[in-house]
Amino acid sequence: MATVIRSLGLSGISGYPLSVEVAIIAGLPGTTIVGLGDSAVKEAKDRMEACTQELGYAYPVKKVVVNLSPSDIKKRGAYLDLPMLVGMLVESAQVVPRRKDWEDIAMVGGISTTGSLVASDGVLPMAIQAHKLGWKRLVVPVACAREASLVSDIDIIACENVQQVIAYLEQRTHIEVYRNPPIQGQGAQAPSTGDFHDVVGHGDLFPYLVAAVAGNHNLLLVGLPGSGKSMMAKLLPTILPPMHDDEILEVSSIYSIAGELDGHELKRTRPFRAPHYNMSSQALIGGGPNAKPGEVTLAHRGILFLDELPEFSRKTLESLRLPLEEGRVTVSRVNQKNRYPADFMLVAAMNPCPCGYAGTSRCECTAHAIRTYRQRISGPVLDRIDMQKYVGRVEFNDGHEMTGAVTSASLRDTVIAARERQLHRFQTAGEGISCNSEMTSSHLRRYCHLDDDCATLLQRFYERDHLSVRARYKTIKLARTFADIESSERIGRTHLLHALFSRDLEREQRHV
Amino acid sequence: MCNACPSQTVYWIWLNELRGIPLRTKRTLLELLGNPEKVFNASCGDIAEALAGDGKDPVAGVADRTHPHRFAPLWSQRNLGQAESILRMHEEHHIETLCATDLHYRNIYAHDPKAPLVLYYRGKLAQPEIPLIGIIGSRNCSSYGRRVTREAVCEAVAQGKVVASGLSFGIDALAHETTLALGGATYAFLPCGLHAAQPTAHAQLMERIIGNGAVVTPYSYGKDALPFRFIGRNDLLAAWCDTLLVVEARIQSGSINTARTALAKGKQVFAVPNSLLEPNSHGTNHLLAEGAHVYLNDSLLATPVARDILGPHDAHGMAVRGQGHRILTLLTEKPLGTGDLVSLVGQDTPMVMESLAAMEVADQVEYRSDGRWHRVGGP
C-alpha cells in the first residue's frame, strides 16, 4: 500500500491541501514524479537519491512512483522535497513512524543533498490553510518557523535537517513546539518614519489629505519641483488607520508569497509601495513566468505611490485601470493563472508642466507642451483619481519656522474616527463595503442625500464645467467623506464646497 | 457651388489651381478675357497676345515679348481633370465654392490684389454688409487675455457683428466658443483644406461653427496645413475683416503678421495693452506704436464683484459680496493661498470658500498650479 504524507500547495495567495503519495512497485529502477510538477519538482528525484545516500539509507532498486494529488493543479518549487523523501523512506520500510498521529502531521520544506532542510516562500499562507483545515501539526524548516508560527492554534515543528524529522516521527526525540518570540511593542502602531509635524506651509492641504485617506480616495498631487509633494505622500502612512487581524494575515500572506516578509514577522503596518517609473506593466500588475504578484497586490490594503506620474510608460499606466476599478487582478500565464487582491489607495505626484513651473512667471512651456504633458495621463485613468490637489510653493516665513502646527497623531485620530463612522454606517446596513470611495450609485441614493441648497450649488458647477456623471458621483462621495470627518449626519454646503475644491487640475483644464 | 455662375465653377477652380502662371497674370487674363471659361478656351497665341498687348506693366511686357510662347507647353496640356475631381470631393462633403464674382467675395477680391481667385467654405455666410471683427491672439494665453476676449466678444455679438478667428488654441478657440455660447455668428479661417480641422483637437468645435457660421479657406480639399498656408490664411483673415482685435501676441507670431497685414490694407486694428514685463504681450504693445488703436473697455472694471452665480443663498449673500471686495484687494497685492486668505479676511473657512467659488465662476480669480489664488489680470 502506498504511503500518503500530508502537505500543502500554493495557488494565488492562498494554500490548498495536497497529499504526497509514494508507491514502490515492481519494475526497472527509477523515479517518476507525476502531478504536473515543474522542473524544480522533477529534479527532486536526484536530490532524494543523493540525500538518501548521505543519510545512510538505501534508495529502492525498484520503480518509485510519486503522485502529488490533486494531480491536475500545477506545482512549482522545491517545498515538496521533504514529504516526498519521508514518504519514500516510510514506504520502503526504512523508517517506521512510531507516533500514533504521524499520518496527521503535515510537512513542507526543501532538502539539500547534505540532508539539511531548505526554506521556501509562502509558508504563511500554507500555515493559514492548514489551520483552516483543522490540522494540528506542521513540520517546517527552521528558517520558516517564525513565519509559520504567526498563525495561532497550530503546532509548528521546526526542524534543521531530515534526521530530526525522521527522529521525530520515530519518536526517538522530542521537539518542542516552536513559539514565536514576543514582538517588541504593539506592531499596529504607526511607523516612526517622520511626522506631519515636519511639514510647513501646506496647512491648506491637510484637510484634503485627511479626506483622501479617510475615504480611501485616490489622490494626485500636482506641484512645482521641490514643493514637498513626495515628502507629503511618503508621510501618508503615518496617518493610515491600523489594520484588522484579517487584513494583517491577508497582507502578510501576500508578502510571504512574494518573499518580502521582512524578518519573517507579520506585516502589521499598511503597505506603502513606491515603485520607480521605469517599471514594466508586469512588475506593476503581476506576471513573469510564474505569475507572481505585482506592486498593486503588494500595495493591497495600503498605498501605491507613483511619483512623477507622467514619466510612467503609457502601457504601465493604462494597466492600472482595471485594478483601480475592481480591486483585484487576474494574472494569466502559460504555467499558471492566479487571482490576486489589489485593493489599494493610489497616490500619485506630478509637475504641472514639462518645466515644472506652470502658474509662475518662470514657466516657459507653450500651451501645447503643457497639454501634451498632461495628456500622458489618459482621461480614463485621471477620471479614476478622485482628488487632484495643487501643492503650492512655501513662503519663506513658513519655511523658516521649520515646524508645522499639526501632528500625524492628531490627523490619524481624525482619519480613524471617520473610517469608523463609515464602517459603522455600511456594516449596520450590511452593505459589504467599508469606505466611501467604494459606494455605488445605489449607495449614493441611500446615504448621500443633498438638500435643495446643495443640489443647486452642484448643479451650477455641473452645468458650468460640463462634468461627467462619474465626476458628479465622485464629488458627492467626497462630500460624504468631508461630512464624516466633521461627524455630520447630513452633507452640508461646506462639505460640498470642499469636495468641489478637490479637483484643481480639471478646474484649470477647463480654461486652457 | 458658385451661386453667381454655376457652370463657371469648374473653370474657376481650374484657373485657381493652375500652376506655372502667377496670380497677377491670372487676374490680368480674367480682366482681359472676361471669365475663366474664355481663358480656358483661348489659344496659346491669344494668351500671349493678350498679355503682350496689356502693356500696363512695362517690365512684364518686355519679358513676355522675348518669350512669346512661354505658355505653350503648359497651355497644350491644360485640362479640367483636377478641377473636376476637386469639385466632386467638395460636393460630396458639402463644401461650397466662392469665386471672385460672388457677392460675398467681390469687394474683398477687388480691393486686394493678392486675394486668391476662389475660396471654399462650409456652413452659412452672413449677409455681406454685416461687419466682421477678427479677434485673434496667442495660443498660450493668460487669464487676462481670456477675460478681455470674453468681454470683447460679448460686445461684438451685442453689436451684431460676425466674429472671425483662426480656430487655433487659446484666444482663437475662446473667441469662437464665446460667440457660439452667446448665439452669435462666427467664421473660422483655416490654413488647410476642409477635410480636417486644424488643429485636429478642434474638430468638434469646427462642426459647431459650421452649424452657426462658416469655416473658410483658400485651400482645396486634401491640402494639409503647411507653414506657408498659415500665412495665406492670415492674409485672407486680414483682408476679410473690417476690424481686427489682437488680444495677446508675442513679437514674432502669426497674430502680429496678421495685424501688420491688416494695417497695411488700411483696416482698423485694435491691440490690447498690457504690462511691459509680459512677454506674451510684447507684440501687441509694439502694435500700438505701429499705428494700432488701443483697445479700452471700462466695463471690465465695472463688473460687479461676485455676481450671484452660485444660487440663492441669501443668508450669506451680502456678507459674501462685501468679502469679495476685500479678497480682490488682497489679491491685487500678491497671490495668496486659501489659508492665508482666511486669516487675512478674518472670516471662517467656509465663508471664504463661498466667496472664492463665486468669484471663480465670475472669472475674477483663479486657482493656479502654484497653489495660490490669483486675481485675473493681476500679479
Image (cartoon, coloured by chain):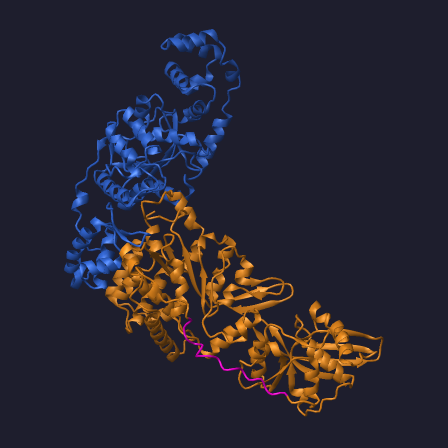
Q: Which residues are magenta?
A: A175-191
Give the answer, above or below, for where A280 lies relative to A330: above
Residue A466 in view (yes/no)? no
Q: Quadrant of residue B236?
A: top left
Horizontally, residue B78 falls left or right of residue A157, namely left
Image chain in orange: A
Horizontally, residue A126 falls left or right of residue B183, namely right
Horizontally, residue A321 falls left or right of residue B168, namely right
Reply yes or no: does residue A433 show up in magenta: no
Give the x, y percent position of residue B79: 51, 22
Q: Main secondary structure of the magenta part?
A: loop
Q: Quadrant of residue A429?
A: bottom left
Q: Colour of chain B?
A: blue
Give the x, y percent position of residue B81: 51, 26
Question: Of residues A63 and A159, which is closer to you in this image?
Answer: A159
Give the x, y percent position of residue B225: 44, 34
Quadrant location of the N terminus of chain B in the rendered image: top left
Reply yes or no: does residue A178 show up in magenta: yes
Q: Quadrant of residue A106?
A: bottom right
Give the x, y percent position of residue B123: 36, 38
